[in-house]
Each structure stands twice: as structure tokens, then as C-alpha cells.
Image (cartoon, rainbow, N blue to C red):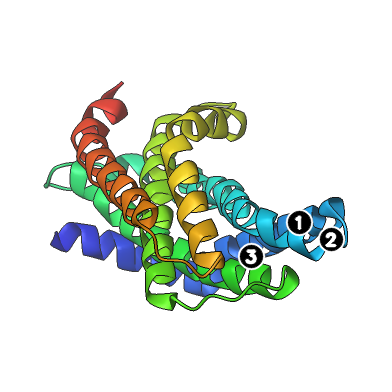
Amino acid sequence: MREALLIALKDLRLEGRSKDILTTTVFFSALVVLIMGFALGPDTERLKDAAPGVLWTALAFASVLAAQRAFGSEQESGALESLLLYPNGHEWVFVGKLIANYLLMLLLGAVTLVTTSLIYNLSYTHLGYLVLVLLLGVLGFSIISVFYAAITVNLRAKEALLPVLMFPICIPVVIGAVSATKILAQNGLTSDLYGWLQLLAGFDLVSLLVAALAFPHALEN
């Protein structure tokens, strides 16, 4: 775990200096929210109904941009092999990259949530549940995107392959997060909400275990 934290701190320190990921993803997600707002038209009720889907669509696409930089700095500088020479298991390299990506995506998610709420005139009364949905949904995106970013980092068409590989796997996250956010946007706490939260938590747990265990073998291949 110490190795994972060192890798995460290194990535966060580099991002703090360059701000490449945050600048790109925040601008991109805000652009998606604005374009979808214009496309849906001035109908207030229609905008409110579509807002949860727009929010998580923006985060899904932005997660691709963030994940492409997860191993990008090491790959561009030729330091990826040196990173993998750490004496501990490679799964801790994955955990470290995941922690850094997750924290950056959470910051992006908070900014996108505020932007969407302002543009689409949304209000939430159960903020605690909304934060929980954001934590679980963003974690699911981070796990899948970082895992496939590692697999495609040395491929020529990695920019095109990464979304093709990760989006089908992220379907449960999109469905669960959009459904839960829509329930909260309608100011309701129903049994369906807890079902969607359980889906998100279960997906995150299973995908984290599978990705951590498969990560060393994926790198070797």
C-alpha cells in the first residue's frame, strides 16, 4: 500500500504542476453539458428530465481523457518499464494509479455536477445520497478506465481503442448512476434508490478485485 500511495502522490504532484488533466476534462465536460442543453431546447421540464443522463454522459467521456494520461507520462518518457520494476506486486501500481485518477475524477465530478445543476435548474434535497452516488459512480469509471488504459498504453490506436473497450463494461455504472441521480433530482427516496446504490457498490467491488488481480497478467501480455 505504501508503493501505491507513493505512485498516487507522484501523479497528483505532476498534475498539480501541469494541470493538464483537470483543464482538459473540465473544459470538455462543460462543453458536453452546454451542447446538450442547446440540443434539448428551452423546455424546462425536458431539461430537468435529461439532466442526470447529461451529467453522467459528460463524466463518462471525460473519464476517457483522464485515463489516457494515467500511464501517459511514463510511456512518453520511457519510464513505464522502470515503474514496473518496483519490488512489490504490479497490482499495487494499479491501485496507486487508480487512487490518483479517482481523486481527480471526483473533483471533475463535483464541478460537472454544479455546472449541470445551474444550467438545467436542478435542486437536490438529499445531498448525502447524491454524494454517495457520485462517489460510487466515479469509482466505477476510474477502475475500468485505468485498467484498460494500462492495456492500451503501448498500442498505436490507443485513443480509439480505450473508449471502445471500456464503455461496454461501464454500462451498469451508467444505468445505476443515471437512475439514482434521477430519483434524487425528483426529491424522492424510494426503495429503487437503494437498489441502484447496491448495484453501483457491487459493480465497484467486483471490478476492483478483478482488475487488480488481472492487471499483472494484462501488462505481461
* Label number found at residue 117: none
At label 1, the amino acid type is Arg
The percent coordinates of residue 198 (x first, y second) are 28, 50
The percent coordinates of residue 169 (x first, y second) are 43, 32
- C-beta proximity under 8 Å, tags 1 and 2: yes
Nearer the N terminus, badge 2 or badge 3? 3
At label 2, the amino acid type is Asp
Compared across the picture, whether 156 is left or right of 105 comes to right
User: Please, which residue is most extreme toward the top here?
Assistant: 221
| Residue 219 or residue 167, whichever sits in front | 167
Q: CA distance from mark 2 to mark 3?
A: 26 Å
Helix, strand or loop under label 3: helix
* Label number found at residue 46: 1
| Residue position for label 2 | 43
* Label number found at residue 26: 3
| In this view, 42 is above or below 75 | below
Q: Is residue 208 visible?
A: yes
The residue at the point 51 percent across, 26 percent down is: 155
Crowding at dot 2, Cα within 10 Å, few <14 / some 14-19 / many 20+, comes out as few
In this rendering, which labeled residue sits more in front, label 2 or label 3?
A: 2
Determine the image quadrant of residue 163. top right
The percent coordinates of residue 172 (x first, y second) are 42, 38
